[in-house]
Amino acid sequence: MENRPKKKAKIKISGMSCASCALNVEKSLKNLEGVDEAQVNLGTEEATVEYDSKKLNLSGLEEAVENAGYGVINEKVTLKIGGMTCAMCVQAIEDVLNKIDGISSVNVNLASERAYVTYNPKMTSLQDMKNAIEDLGYQYLGVEGEETGNREEELRLRDLKGKRNRIIVGFGVSIPLLVLTYVNVPLPISLPYFMLVVSILPFIYVSYPIFTAAYRALRNRNLNMDVMYSLGIGVAFVSSLLGTFQIVLTPEFMFYDTALMLAAFLMLGRYLETRAKGRTSTAIKKLIGMQPKTAAVIRDGKEIEIPIDNVEIDDLVVVKPGEKIPADGEVVEGESYVDESAITGEPLPVLKNAGKSVVGGTINQNGALKFKAIKIGKDTVLAQIIKLVEMAQGSKPPVQRIADRAVTYFIPTILTIAFISFVVWYFVLASNLLFALTVLISILVVACPCALGLATPTAVTVGIGRGAELGILVKNGEALEISEKLTTILFDKTGTLTKGKPEVTDIIGSSIDVESLLKIAASVERNSEHPLAEAVVKKAAKEGINLLEAGEFDSFGGKGVKAVVDEKEVIIGNRTLFKDKNIPIIDKTEGKIFELENEGKTAILIGFNGEIAGIIAVADTLKESTKAALRELKKMKLQVAMITGDNNRTAKAIAGQIGIERVISEVLPQDKAAEVKRLQNEGEIVAFVGDGINDAPALAQADVGIAIGSGTDIAIESGDIVLIKDDLMDSVAGVQLSKKVMGRIKQNLFWAFAYNVVLIPVAAGVLYPTFGITFRPEFAGLAMALSSVTVISLSLMLKGYVPPAEKLKDVN
């Protein structure tokens, strides 16, 4: 019988409530080809699966569970890794981690030097990951968020210092040797022996990291940049040795200076690359730097200073002027202005006193505050923003698949081209061996997959970091790519285009006086949480009206409410509700409703005991930035639409004020997602802009969900793009930023591909027969060093990008 690679997986499942749920999961798993046995324990909420790893992997099992309608409980971790130099390193680490049983997905970001891993803690551990990374020859620097001191920075500085020393030695020796080949200087021994004696130790010192990295890669059956480059400089140095001792080759084969200079050029490229990569993640470092290390809390009546990690929920925390607020909470004592600009982007400090909320990482300015800690550690707004930005920077937009695919075949292709070029020049075209070897070396050192590997992650890292600085949190690379292709932006009306704080404008009684109508309506509406209900209650409070008790309260989603007040059955709502309750609306009342709706007001109908008693008109104020934001979106050739629960007449009146042609009205809250789906079925690529809390289904259905926040009170999990500020111009800025980042990624990929497509044929000697142009290995090495630096530099330019919408804010 054939021995199959059997594996056993344990999957933690959420959402099972009964025995039939367990049976459903078992059935879904057993239906998969390659599953031999599946058992689900409802008590422990665990599935144990035996499967054939050649036919199936862990992510396939998890997908089956999720498709059955249940959740898979995994853990996510961000690993810090040192020693990565090119796209092949990324592939090697992803491959070795994906081979570990229990790991569902791995995404390695070369720019930030992080691995984002989703894993099953019952099947594997961080130690397994650490061992796998170190066995490959890379440095495991710990977990993101773990207190590792300045170890990462110390290693980076030590690495930079080592590279700098090798650059100095490499060029310090190779340049004089190069000069010696052109200048006739009296030497104590012959030139070949002199160059060997002078270059051998510097060559070993400078090239040692390249050869050791190549050895590790080959040991793990990987082909990377180091393998290719070490072949190039190795061929150069060995050819020189053979020529020096006249074994097969003659003394004209002198590449000592070339080999050393090439090794120095690789060090120079990596030195510049490491420095530049360090600058791509300054935004996240700035956010992490906002977190204070200690907090002053009151324990047993005494004020003591403790590490930030020891702060507990409900602790009373004291913050003096100039100090950072260590947790999210509510002020219980004191008054002060707090600078929230680092999180909200608002330049003016906000007054905080008893009852007001404060956010960790913001700066207390002029007075002492005492507040109760409500959210601590990883639950604070700042910690959530940091986590979101980190995960987003580690994501890959679909466009990166082009580069990933190219990198997979890159090195085998280059080795093939180098070998064929050597054979063609030496054996077919009968060129001399020196020329053929020069071509071989030039091809091996000029080809660079690094630029391809860095093109996307550097732009994503810098772009998403820049977005965070502007108060625009982009949650993944896919959102960036789709935002560039949008055709329609659909805005929710209430709280998005308008302030979401409606006010009563008219009260019209038909069979009752105005004050009594307001009194009864407010008595019912105070049981509702709808913004229109709040407006009615607020109006009654402003008029000093004492409210009555309401009983038998009931609500009808998106239509209205009913209750019994003062022995009257009171119905409050829209036309649909009155039609459902068979309450007739007379022509005179209908005419008044028509008039109010044409003014952009919402007419709330009030009925007593089956008859209409009056109308209360409510209007919401447009946000100051609404008209300007919509104008800018139209300039970008995007179709703008509005969705609302208002009746068609009111909706069109409001849309007319702000220049929106397409209106989707009379939509119940639960049906917004279906309307988004309808637009998508028409071929539109849709962004939905709405409240992150109330519009969650529509935000999830849209191609890009843009959740608009209100300062520090934001729903981080709500959309693909989360706007911290309650400013519609940021939705425009978010789209502009996405377009800019995607444009830079495409520009990077173009240069990375163009560099290799143009220079590899030149190195192979295609221009030599016609123009007599060859590519010396030294120049090939310089070009290779500059290719990655060019791509990173282009990405770093995003750090200073200001979306046009941001500039317009200053004008307005």
Image: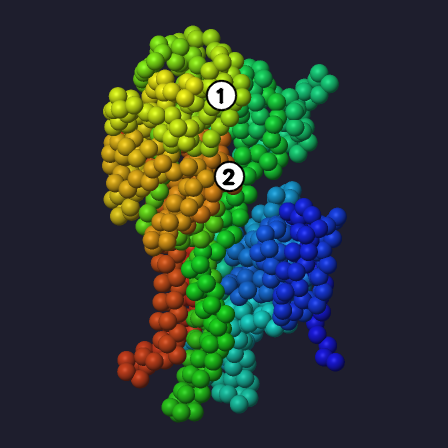
Could you tell me which residue is drawn at 33 percent across and 40 percent down?
Answer: 664
Label 2 residue SS: loop
Say what amino acid the circle numbered 1 marks: Ala
| Residue 312, image quadrant | top right
Alpha carbons under labels 2 and 1: distance apart: 37 Å
Say what amino acid the circle numbered 2 marks: Ile
Direction from residue 175 to residue 589 in the image, left or right: left
Evaluate whether residue 256 shows in this view. no
Question: Image height check: is 382 above or below 139?
Answer: above
Seen from the viewer's position, the closer of residues 432 and 249 is 432
Direction from residue 561 to residue 301 in the image, left or right: right
Could you tell me which residue is drawn at 44 percent across and 14 percent down?
Answer: 520
Question: Image height check: is 121 above or below 635?
Answer: below
Residue position for label 2: 716
Could you tell me which residue is drawn at 40 percent across and 92 percent down?
Answer: 428
- The answer to whether mark 2 and mark 1 are in CB contact below 8 A is no
Residue position for label 1: 563
Evaluate whether residue 49 shows in this view. yes
Question: Image height check: is 680 above or below 577?
Answer: below
| Residue 27, image quadrant | bottom right
Q: Earlier in the sequence, mark 2 or mark 1?
A: 1
- The percent position of residue 468, horizontal first and vertical second, equals 45, 41
Are there few (<14), some (14-19), or many (20+) residues within 10 Å of tag 1? many
